[in-house]
Each structure stands twice: as C-alpha cells, then as structure tokens.
Image: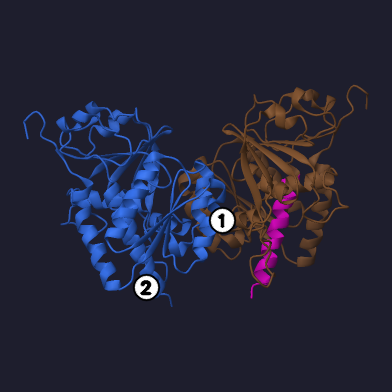
Chain colours: A brown, B blue
Amino acid sequence: MSSSNPGRTILASTIAKKYVQEVQDDVSKLGRSPKLVGFLANTDPAAQMYADWTGKTAESLGFTYELRVVNKEELEEAIINANEDDKVDGIMVYFPVFGDRQDQYLQQVVSLEKDVEGLNHKYIQNMYHNVRFLDSEEHQKSILPCTPLAIVKILEYLGVYNTLLAYGNRLYGKQIVVVNRSEIVGRPLAALLANDGATVYSVDITGIQKFTRGEGLKLSRHKVEDVDLTLEQVSQNADVIVTGVPSATYKFPNEFVKDGAVVVNFSSEKNFNANVKEKASLYVPMIGKVTIAMLLRNLLRLVNNKTSEV
Amino acid sequence: MSSSNPGRTILASTIAKKYVQEVQDDVSKLGRSPKLVGFLANTDPAAQMYADWTGKTAESLGFTYELRVVNKEELEEAIINANEDDKVDGIMVYFPVFGDRQDQYLQQVVSLEKDVEGLNHKYIQNMYHNVRFLDSEEHQKSILPCTPLAIVKILEYLGVYNTLLAYGNRLYGKQIVVVNRSEIVGRPLAALLANDGATVYSVDITGIQKFTRGEGLKLSRHKVEDVDLTLEQVSQNADVIVTGVPSATYKFPNEFVKDGAVVVNFSSEKNFNANVKEKASLYVPMIGKVTIAMLLRNLLRLVNNKTSEV
C-alpha cells in the first residue's frame, strides 16, 4: 500500500466465503441434493461463463445443476416443463434472451415456487413494500432478487452498514449512487438501500432519481423523486458508488469519486478505470461469486418454503 | 367512389355499434352499475382524450366511471387501494407512466380480478397458450388484452375472418403484417392471429419475425421464427396491414400496400398516408371506440367471474 494509491481491492470470492460455507452446511443438513436448472438461450459469452461458474459452485457445494441450452423460441415451453417437473427445485434463466419486455414476460413464466432469482412480480412487489413473508403465519420467506441481495451483502461485509444501529437504520446518513436503473438490479437495489435508511441517487440515461425511505406512508416503502442534479453533483458526497453499465467503453469518471468512497461494479464489463483506487478506499471489481452464493441460498429457501407449506 | 380511389374508410364507431349494444344490454340485465376506475399519471394529451372517451362511453352505457389523476410516484399505492376497495369492479391505467419495464411492473400491481385491460401475466400467458378459462371447471373466463381483441373484432367485421371455416382456422391462408411488437399490443396480436391460422409478419426496429400456428407442439400455441426479409417483401402479399407506431412522422410506405389490402391503424398518430385508399380496399384510421367497447366487455366478464367463483 503506497500513499499515492491507498485503496484496496476486495475480491468477491473473499466476501462469498461465509455464505458459501453457510449454504454448504445447510445442504448437508438437508440430506438430499436440491436440483437447479439453468436455461441458456443466448450466445452471450458472459452468460455462458456465469452459467459455468454457477454449475461448478453448485456441484461443489452438494447441489445438482443442469444447464439446458435451448433455442430462444423453445424457451417458454422448456420453462413450463421444468415448472411441472417435481425433480426440479429451482429454475434460472440467463438473460438477455429477446431483450426488454419479452424477457420480463419470460421471467414471469418461471413459477413462484422455483424462482431462485427472486424476479417473480410477487417477490419484487414484496421487496418494494418491505413484506418479508409470503404467508400471514410467516412460515414462507419471500425471496429477494439475487443480484441486489448480493450487493447488500457486499456492503455489509465492507462495513458500510453500521451494525450499532437498529435494522432498517443501518445505512442512516449514507449517500449512495447507483448507476443502473434496470427492473432486475438497479431499481430494486435503490429501494433496498433506501429501505435501510440511505439516500440513494439512481442514475440512468433518462435522468437521476432520489430514493429515500418515505415517511408517514401507509405502506412501508421508499419514496422516489426526480432530481435536477448532475452525476458529478450526486457523486461528490457519495460514500458508495455502485455501477452496472453493460458497456465495454463506459467508465465512471475517476474525478467524481470522493476520496475514501467504496466502489462496487456489478457489470460484467469494467465500469471503473484501473486507477480508481487512487480515490476509492475499497474497490469490488466483480460480484458474480457473491451473486451465485445468494442464488443457492435462495434455492434453499425455496426448498424450505415447500416443506413449510400449510 | 371513383375508379382512381376505390377504397372505403370504415369508422371504429360503426364497428363498435354491435358490441356497445351488447354491453349495454348486459349491464341492464345485471341490475347494478359496475364501477371502473381509470388512473391517469401522465400528461399525454392522447391518454387524456382516451380517458375522456372511456368515461363518456362507460357512463352512457350504465357503468360508473371514476378518473383518478395521481402523481406517478403515488400510482402504485393508489392502485393497491383500488385493488382492496370492494366498490371498485375494474381498474385501468393510462400508460406510459415511467415507460418501459417499470410500467410493466405497475401493470402487474393491478389485481387479476380487476384487470379490465387483460394485461396481467396470467391473462397474457393464457392467451399465448390458447387457454380460455381460469379454472378447470371453465366457469371463469380468462380476459384477453383489450387492444389486440379490438383488432380481432375489427378484422371479423371487415370480413377478413372466413366464417365458413372452423374456429381456429378462420384466417387460414391469410398473410398479415403487424408493424409494432410491444408486449401489450403487437406481440399478443400476432399470436392471436397466428392462433387463428394466419401467417403473421411482426415488424419492429429490431427486425421481422414470422408467427404461425405451430404444429405438433404439446402446448397449443403459435410458433415464432426470425426471418431475413424486408418490410417491402413481407408487405407485397399481405392481405392485411396493421400499424401501431407511436410517431407523428412515421408513415407506412403506400407503395408497399397490395391492391385491395385491408389496413388498420391502432396508433394515436396517423401511420398511413392520406392517399392509402388508392391501394387499400378498406381502411380503419383509428380503433379507440372498439377498444373501449372491449374494455367494458372485459369489465362485465370480471364481474361475472366474481359471481362464478367456486
């Protein structure tokens, strides 16, 4: 560590370790090998790599993993078959397939009971409203979308969450910039962080929105406002910057990073410049291994929900 | 009618007449006034006009209509309140609000039991798979998305459907071009037409897809293939051209219209040139009034489903 470059890189594998162990212990307690089926219907090398990693990790921890490579036109029927197959415990789809709204349609075809990614409308709506269980008896846990959940766990590991504060306030006073407002990562993440007390600036090409925990609302949920601020303005006081821009050329401007900020990139492309650690204190360049740990954790919850059905 | 301009314009009001009458009769038989709530959270003049029309038509036929103008940030909570209000029979939202995926999220917040637009994932998935009821006893009808349904009814009126053929084959041999592949109109419409036997070319900026009724599939549903054809190639033999491009400047090229083709525009903008009737035999410039009739017809089905619950 030199004075000109004080920042540290923290690898996802380091952060994932605790969750990987937890998942492995839970599988061995379960006494059977839950089966995860992944559907690959695109030729994106990043998706193929992620599928390989998922398979290797899953198998090494005692799960059964099966990758089904299908034509995109056959994907819907293939998902329905897996929904109906009692031997399949969890299903995930490597997106994008068609892109945009048709993918959102396909994601909803995965049955609630097998959706390890936590992208079913019911799970997402529960997340936005801080509803943590599916049933009023609170036996069946609602699933959180796995990438946003992974980022929350990463921020916990990095000490961004203040454990001296009560749950729900542990990000109180923190300012966070999230560059991505997709329905599967950016927007749910902004909501999760706002629900924990942070002020979150959610950035995409259409503008910047500010997410805070609303007050006095009947529904316990975050509040969103459009703000007329620039990326530079919202970044200069940001304690945390999270990026997820799916572009090889996009780089978050180094000069907007506050000295000592925590920076996390969840894109499969490198969204930060190589010298970001001249400013950032902690830098997480990739998060895939934590996401996979969350995916398997979600799978165990689904298995548990099935046995908790009333 | 001159020989240089043989085509006729058919107004939506003419086509709607039969359905309007049917809906009015059914409301009077019902003996109470079903309540429809519309949510307007944008400043789009086309949405405001459509809301006014819906209100006027609904009230004139014996329904109760209430337009709730809300801030887009309050829309989700407002929908949830209407879901929980026993006095509300049906709910519709005037989109776009946020645009894109977040609107798709909001649409799913509307409860299945009150979704007059037929855009709930369950209804759309049923439509794609030709599933016509919600329950195995076949008491509760699945709702069809109202704009695609309106276009089907228009094509029936115009004689495109051959009533001498069996249901499911009534578009056999017909070639149809649909310029729009949105998840709420273009794609469901292509599927509905393909399910009735047509060959449908679905056109959007990403390319052209061919929808046909698949054969030998376990699921009774349409088949989709990407095709390497131009708009001119797919149009030159098209019996029907349906457009829905939300742009004031887009015009479907007149020279691509086959002599005698039937052309229907469902965009709030005029997608055909004024002289389209030099080629087309029948031209439906707008469809709103038929769509509203279908919306109210769907509302009556929802009311009926509620009383048919087992």
- Considering only order in the chain, which callout, 2 or 1, is on the residue closer to the N terminus? 1
Q: Nearer the viewer, residue A307 or B179?
A: B179
Furthest residue toward right: A2
Q: Which residue is mark 1?
A: B77
Q: Is residue A156 left or right of residue A231?
A: right
Tell me where the magenta segment starts and ends, as one range: A290-310
The reply to whether residue A155 is visible in this rendering is: yes
Q: Does the magenta-highlighted stretch encompass residue A304?
A: yes
Q: Which labelled disc corresponds to residue B139?
A: 2
Q: State which chain disc 2 sits on.
A: B
Q: Is residue B85 left or right of residue B234?
A: right
Residue under the point 79% across and 66% down? A29
- Up the image or down, B250 lies above or below B101; here it is above
- Up the image or down, A162 lies above or below B243; here it is below
Q: State which chain disc 1 sits on.
A: B
Q: Nearer the viewer, residue A263 or B248?
A: B248
**SS under mark 2:** loop
Image coordinates for residue B98, horizontal then vertical, percent: 52, 42
**What quarter of the picture does the C terminus of chain A occupy?**
bottom right
Image coordinates for residue A72, horizontal then vertical, percent: 49, 44
